[in-house]
Amino acid sequence: MVDFLITRPRRLLGVAWPFLLLMGLQPSACQSQQAAPTAEQTPVAAPEDAPAGPAKASAIPAVAKGYFLFPIKPGQPNFLAGSMGELRPNHFHGGLDIKTDGRVDLPVHAAADGYISRLKQSSFGYGNVLYITHPNGLTTVYGHLNHFKGPAAEELRRRQYAKKSYELELFFEPGQFPVKRGDVVALSGNTGGSVGPHVHWEVRTADNHQLNPLQWGGFPEIQDHVAPVVQAFAVEALGIDSRVDGRFGKSTFVPKAPLADGSYAWPDTIGATGTVGLLVQGFDRFDQVWNKNGFQQVEVLVNNRPIYKHVVDDIPFPEGSRQINRHVDYEWRATQGRQLEKLFVDDGNDLSMYTTGPDKGRLRVQPGQVYQVEIRLSDSYGNTTPLRFVLRGEEAAYFKTRSAAVKAPALRYDVSRNLLVITAPDPDTAAVGGNVTLVRGNRHLSLRPSYTDRSQNVYLYDLRAGRPDSIRFGRLSQRFSREALIPAGREFGFATAQMNLGFGPKTLFDTLYLQTSYKQGLWTVHLPRTPLYETLALTLRPETPVTDLRRTAIYSVTAKGGRGYVGGKWSADGTSITANIKTFGQFRLLTDTIPPSGRLLSKGAGGVVFKVGDDLSGLASYELEINGQFRLLRYEHKNATLFTERDDTLGPPLRGPATLRLTDQAGNEKVISVVL
């Protein structure tokens, strides 16, 4: 037994050399799914090369229907609060959330014969979680438990007292704690990151792939005769030559209601040009419940020919789970609040759950052609909802529409994939909008607008041909703030006077056009709407010396005043601090000098409860002694309490003088003395 404390490249083709020389650049390679432009920014086809090779699917043993027992109220009707593969913030939901009648302490049954291979107690994540490994090599996982039962629970308690820590993880050998199918191994709870009583139940392979427990025929306890619901779909222009209804970007469509047969249809033909991607938003429900769950499978057919399919039955944990941020349109969710699933495999996505052709689900729309599109959404019980619409290929052409609301010229820009998208509102009544100029040193490049929509001139430029210093429109000028091109798939460093960024081979999903800034103690590291895959090493160098290094750390901050402890390690000379960050955003150095707070809420034969808190860095450790002897406490972060457990027979009696020692992440300590 082992125990641990819980403490893509394509050459730049078709670019005229005079153009590159104008920009002072040489051709280069970069990860993207758009081909590079010509000097006149003429349309090109999307590349045929695929993203990095997909992750290998796990070897899954054959599982007969009925092999696994439903772990909560087996044989009785039950309900799910969550399904496998639901789209959660930064991860796919890795199993089933089983309802427990809105209460805790329901018996949790072993799903099959095997042995308890792992136990973990934590106040975050899965909370109290138990793992049972079965003879076929699969492991079932039971999370958010209230209590463990049996000899393994007794061994855990002994180890907790030996380590003087409630937060503990144990690994057991085969045969050490055997269980039979149906044995009660725990009681259900609401621990860790749970937001209500339930049991999170998973099936995993030996190499830690999370599998959908419903893929082997489902369970009679859970009934599902309800087909998925379509909330919206989108068509996105994916290249510099691509348009949807004449415009670059993403067009979303919201069907009003399903037809009589349960299918959905968009009544109008959607015009498109070039390479486009499809996206969809929807949810599924089980019988007699109103929870909005995810669907298991999506298939796309164009003119009755399949071009894309994904099945969420196998997610490698934990690295594959975070790939959700490439599977969904992360930026659209962050800026528009709508969760769209991409129905094409985007660069940087190496999950194995996709079946596509050479274009990875992208659709090449040719002028004059008609494309009958059908998107099929299915759940694990075979209920399917079709969504149908028509795309018609159009010739790309300049057009201009006007709006009286535009009174004065303006200039703004953004970056979409490898494209610089410039928008210049202009009240000018000329038949064609004016040009913008890209400036790099003493070189100038004039761009014609691609179209003018309601007096908004839109210009497109492929940044792989070089990053400009500034953009000019008439008398208006803006500095181009993207400081560097950061390639994905390899180590890369970036530095300014105030910060260093260390990118690893898997920090980014795709090429990044980075922007940073520093002002008055506030470091901005790119934009929160761009996801990170793995962590980014962030080093901050403050302008003035920090006097209290021990209590000063990196914190993420929000515009509304939110602060989140990141931590960090100071350099030997105290001039810089480094930490790994999981998201882009804004950061400050804050000093925490205030110790944690705590007070006795209740005491008696049933146990002792303390209310605790910390104003900044957060609670790091806690220890209770009664009459000088260690007594185990359990921490529940959701209600900020520390409490003893009724079944603890190893600790000293709950009477006499007691001392509670609280320490926060900054090392501030608070000692509370009470008499029990």
Image (cartoon, rainbow, N blue to C red):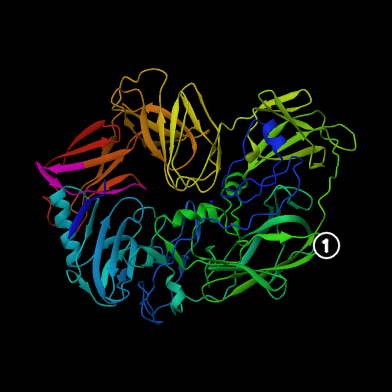
Residue 11 magenta: no
Reply above or below: 481 against 676: above
Position of 175 with respect to 69 (left or right) is left
Q: Is residue 25 left or right of residue 349?
A: right
Amino acid at pointer 1: Gly
Furthest toward the top, the residue is: 544
Compared with 168, 414 (above or below) is above
Q: Which residues are magenta?
A: 623-638
Question: Visible in this render: residue 485?
Answer: yes
Q: Position of residue 89 (x, y in %)?
A: 49, 51
- Quarter of the image with the C terminus is top left
Query: For the point 25% across and 77% down, which residue is it?
Result: 180
Residue 217 shown left or right of residue 576 in the figure = right
Q: Quick one: 383 or 534, which is closer to the camera?
A: 534
Give the residue drawn at x 69%, y 23%.
Answer: 442
Query: Picture coordinates of residue 30 (x, y %)?
Result: 57, 45
Disc 1 target residue: 368
Q: Quadrant of residue 59?
A: bottom left
Residue 648 shows up from this direction: no
Main SS category, magenta section: strand
